[in-house]
Amino acid sequence: MSVCERSHDVRRGVDDRHVTECRDCRDAAAVHGFFQRLATADDLAPSLPDPRVLLLKAELVRRGETDLRESDGARWAGVAIWTAIAISWLVALTWKLDEIRAVAERLTIVELLPGGAAANAILVVAVVGLVAFTVFAVAVHSLLAEL
Amino acid sequence: MDDHAFEAFYRKHARQTWARLYRITGDGAAADDLLQRAFLRFLTEADAARSEGELVAFLVRIATNLALDDLRKERRRHSVGESEGTSPAGAGQSDLRRDVAKALATLEPRERAMLWMAHVDGFSHAEIAEVVAVGAGSVKVLLHRARRKLAGVLERMGMGPEATR
């Protein structure tokens, strides 16, 4: 489509003779005059909001976004902790199931005391630690869910 | 941008931004809502280090795109003629205002936005292309079509070049 190169410059003033002879520039001149009148028309009386209200709203939006980012961080931390717990249990139950069962069958308070079951001390401590950590994580998760 | 600078910027450009939104949507209530959203986005995204010219161009881009996106999403053809009654100026509109509304209603919202940028903001084809996300060559053709369409309507209404100059 061939469009007069000068039509977009009508707004800056193109000689009248060219405008009379060129259809594109004539159209552009009519439209330019029309839009200039629209832009300067004072028949519209909008009730513009106070800029201080907009500043306040923008501040609230920013705070909301910050809260969202922070809660995103907490959510990802939660996912990481639960994943670590799940992997630990999976590893323990896959490779150490028999030992855990054996320890559980003869687990007494005496064995839990220092020097009780020297051979399995590390395993006992690891399992008890994992159980304690799981219970702690469930408790924290429940507490945070209540907030 | 600090609060005082924003207030000064707002007082200088809010009315013109509202007029732009009103002419694109043809709806006073929509223009009110879009104005607030445009300035809120401006406040949360504008880089204070920019020059005033760049800030104005940024505001134009936000406001125009919000208006066009809303109209596109709603898939509602806002006829300027039909919704002129919702303007804040209220009832008792003159024949001239009705004619203006009718003439604008013959254009698509995007055409109204592009013509406003070309003839009120004085944007180049490249600047308009950036706002409406089309090539500069396409802007030239789209503007040409929109001008031809509107000029024809204006001529039929007796608002041709001689009347509008």
Image (cartoon, coloured by chain):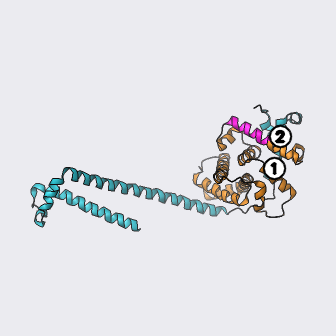
Q: How many discs appear?
A: 2
Chain under disc 2:
A
Judged left or right of residue A67, residue A37 is: right
Residue drawn 83% across and 61% down?
Answer: B93
Please say whether residue A24 is visible from this viewpoint.
yes
The x, y position of residue A32, in whole percent, is: 81, 44
Q: Quadrant of the C terminus of chain B?
A: top right
Q: Is residue B24 above or below residue A15?
A: below
Q: Which mark is residue A27?
A: 2
Q: Quadrant of the N terminus of chain B?
A: bottom right
Residue drawn 69% across and 34% down?
Answer: B137
Q: Nearer the viewer, residue B58 or A84?
A: A84
Q: Which residue is mark 1?
A: B103
Count neighbours of disc 1 (C-alpha within 10 A) and say few if under 14, some if 14 to 19, many if 20 or more: many
Judged left or right of residue A95, residue B154 is: right
Q: Amino acid at mark 1?
A: Ala
Residue B135 lies in the magenta-colored region: yes
Q: CA distance from mark 2 to mark 1?
A: 14 Å
Among the 4 quarters of the image, the one containing residue A135: bottom left
Predominant SS of the magenta segment: helix
Q: Amino acid at mark 2?
A: Asp
Q: Which mark is residue A83?
A: none
The x, y position of residue B109, in whole percent, is: 72, 49
Count neighbours of disc 2 (C-alpha within 10 A) and say few if under 14, some if 14 to 19, many if 20 or more: many
* Chain assigned orange: B
Q: Which residues are magenta?
A: B134-148
